[in-house]
Amino acid sequence: MALPGGFATHLLVPHARYLVDVEGLDASTCAVLACGGVTASSAVGKFKPLHADDWVCS
């Protein structure tokens, strides 16, 4: 089964602002950063709609 995602050999990025220059970083460090980013994004996506004055604490 083929699914789109960060572990594919290629992916499309909708805008250059989402790109990070990883030159000089170790590949294993980059892999951990990608995993952490997906984890954080998934957690934020589970919040109910928030108002401008709402607080989010961990």
Image (tube, rainbow, N blue to C red):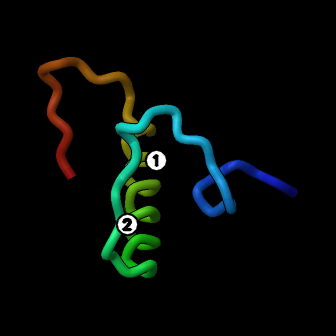
Q: How many marks?
A: 2
Q: Quadrant of residue 49?
A: top left
Amino acid beneath label 2: Leu
Q: Residue 12 at x, y = what percent?
A: 60, 42
Q: CA distance from mark 2 to mark 1?
A: 14 Å
Q: Which residue is mark 2?
A: 33
Q: Which residue is mark 1?
A: 42
Per the image, label 1 sits on a secondary structure element best described as: helix
Give the mark toward the camera: 2 or 1.
Answer: 2
Q: Quadrant of residue 50?
A: top left
Q: Are marks 2 and 1 in contact (CB under 8 Å)?
A: no
Name the one closer to the observer, 30 or 32.
30
Residue at the location (44% across, 62% down)?
34
Residue at the location (66% across, 55% down)?
10
Residue at the location (76% across, 51% down)?
3
Quadrant, the N terminus: bottom right
Q: Earlier in the sequence, mark 2 or mark 1?
A: 2
What is the number of the mark on residue 6?
A: none
Mark 2 burial class by Cα count in 10 Å: few <14, some 14-19, many 20+ = few
Seen in the picture, residue 15 relative to 49 is either above or below; the reply is below
Name the one closer to the observer, 17 or 36.
17
Q: Quadrant of residue 27?
A: bottom left
Q: Residue 16 at x, y = what percent?
A: 41, 38
Residue at the location (17% across, 26% down)?
54
Mark 1 burial class by Cα count in 10 Å: few <14, some 14-19, many 20+ = few
